Image (cartoon, grey):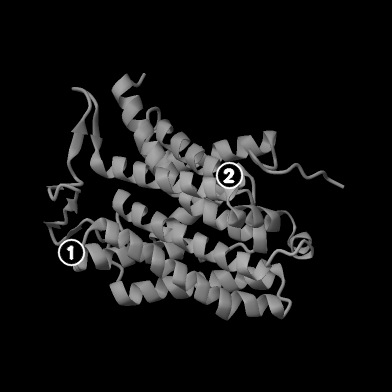
């Protein structure tokens, strides 16, 4: 049986990885809820965010905070550009779900190959470049290595990287949840997710809401990509490998429900990491998807999804 220290450290790992799943899943869920678009390029948006931060942090030597801002801005700008240049014209031409799905799948391959063309296929560490450690500046001007650990007790040592991911992702997730719940933009996003036609009839500027949805989804994808690169490593396939888990989080929480995506992402990360206390870590993805199947057998609409009756 695992001891208390192992449970604490495994839970921290689960919350860190679950936060990355949740950040990616919320953006994916918002886009699907409003546009009914399954965006297979979402994972590659995350990869682009990781490489944008890599250029700022590892190459330019700036702080990780600057890298995070740059990643969010660049991926949000790309999302907005694709909305205006690809997705909106496709919708105006009456493209169906299958055409949009194939378009997103093709876009995913294009982005991945472009990333590989510019940065090759080598795995990279966001916080170091050829052995040179990039330090994180704090408010007092001192610096601390993100590879150090915080000794909580004699048996519990928590890495600063995991703590940083949890705190940063936690702040972002709470901010998005509050925005969706209390702001006018968040309420209109939820209204469009229920019915675009009714939202238009009620006078909501749907084009504006869709634009901001893409900006939010892109920003969260960029942030998730940075945290994924910090937590593990970075390669052109990083987002693609995470995408399956993000889809699982969306389905587990309830398709099209942003709050459900948040819960689904955290739950998936915790279940996968907790399983490593009893079985080999190589099987943790299978355990996560096994739990997904069990939950859907009990509640097919997901944790927070709407019940859909069979005809």
- Tell me: 109 left or right of 47: right
Whether pointer 1 and pointer 2 mark residues with C-beta atoms closer than 8 Å, the reply is: no
Residue 127 seen from this side: yes
Circle on res. 259: 2
Q: CA distance from mark 1 to mark 2?
A: 36 Å
- Which residue occupies 59% across, 46% down? 181
- Which corner quadrant of the image does residue 98 belong to? bottom right
Expressed as whole percent of the image width and height from the top left, the position of residue 284 reads: 43, 39
Residue 240 appears in view: no
Q: Residue at x 65, y 39 (%)?
A: 296
Closest to the observer: 250 or 142? Answer: 142
Residue 42: x percent and y percent? 50, 62
Residue at the (23%, 62%) spot, across then down: 57
- In this rendering, the answer to whether 309 lies above or below 77 is above
Which numbered dot is residue 61? 1
Is the N terminus in the top left, top right, bottom left or bottom right quadrant?
Answer: top left
Tag of residue 255: none
Q: Quadrant of residue 115?
A: bottom left
Mark 1 or mark 2, earlier in chain: 1
User: On the picture, is 104 further left or further right than 77?
Assistant: right
Q: Alpha-carbon neighbours of circle 2 within 10 Å: few (<14), some, or many (≥20)?
A: many
* SS assignment at label 1: loop
Could you say where residue 17 lies in the image, as x and y percent from the top left? 40, 44
Query: In the image, residue 185 lies at what x, y percent?
Result: 59, 57
Q: Where 146 sits versus 60, above or below?
A: above
Report whether 43 appears left or right of 2: right
| Quadrant of residue 131 within the rendered picture | bottom left
């Amino acid at each position: 049986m695992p001891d208390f220290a192992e449970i604490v450290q495994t839970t921290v790992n689960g919350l860190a990885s679950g936060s990355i799943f949740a950040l990616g899943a919320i953006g994916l869920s918002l886009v699907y809820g409003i546009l009914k678009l399954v965006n297979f390029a979402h994972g590659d948006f995350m990869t682009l965010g990781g490489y944008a931060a890599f250029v700022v942090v590892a190459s330019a030597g700036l702080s990780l905070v600057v890298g995070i801002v740059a990643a969010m801005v660049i991926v949000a700008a790309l999302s907005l550009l694709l909305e205006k240049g690809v997705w909106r014209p496709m919708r105006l031409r009456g493209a169906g779900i299958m055409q949009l799905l194939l378009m997103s799948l093709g876009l995913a391959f294009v982005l991945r190959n472009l990333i590989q063309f510019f940065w090759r296929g080598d795995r990279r560490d966001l916080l170091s470049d050829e052995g040179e450690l990039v330090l994180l500046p704090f408010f007092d001007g001192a610096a601390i290595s993100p590879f150090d650990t915080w000794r909580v007790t004699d048996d519990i040592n928590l890495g600063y990287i995991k703590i940083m991911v949890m705190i940063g992702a936690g702040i972002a997730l709470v901010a998005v949840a509050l925005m969706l719940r209390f702001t006018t933009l968040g309420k209109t996003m939820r209204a469009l997710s229920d019915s675009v036609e009714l939202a238009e009839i009620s006078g909501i500027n749907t084009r504006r809401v869709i634009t901001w949805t893409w900006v939010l989804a892109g920003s969260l994808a960029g942030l998730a990509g940075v945290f994924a690169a910090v937590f593990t490593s970075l390669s052109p396939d990083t987002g693609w490998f995470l995408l399956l888990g993000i889809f699982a989080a969306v389905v587990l929480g309830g398709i099209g429900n942003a709050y459900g995506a948040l819960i689904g992402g955290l739950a998936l990360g915790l279940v996968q990491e907790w399983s490593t206390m009893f079985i080999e870590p190589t099987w943790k993805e299978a355990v996560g998807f096994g739990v997904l199947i069990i939950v859907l057998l009990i509640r097919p609409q997901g944790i927070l999804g709407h019940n859909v009756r069979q005809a």
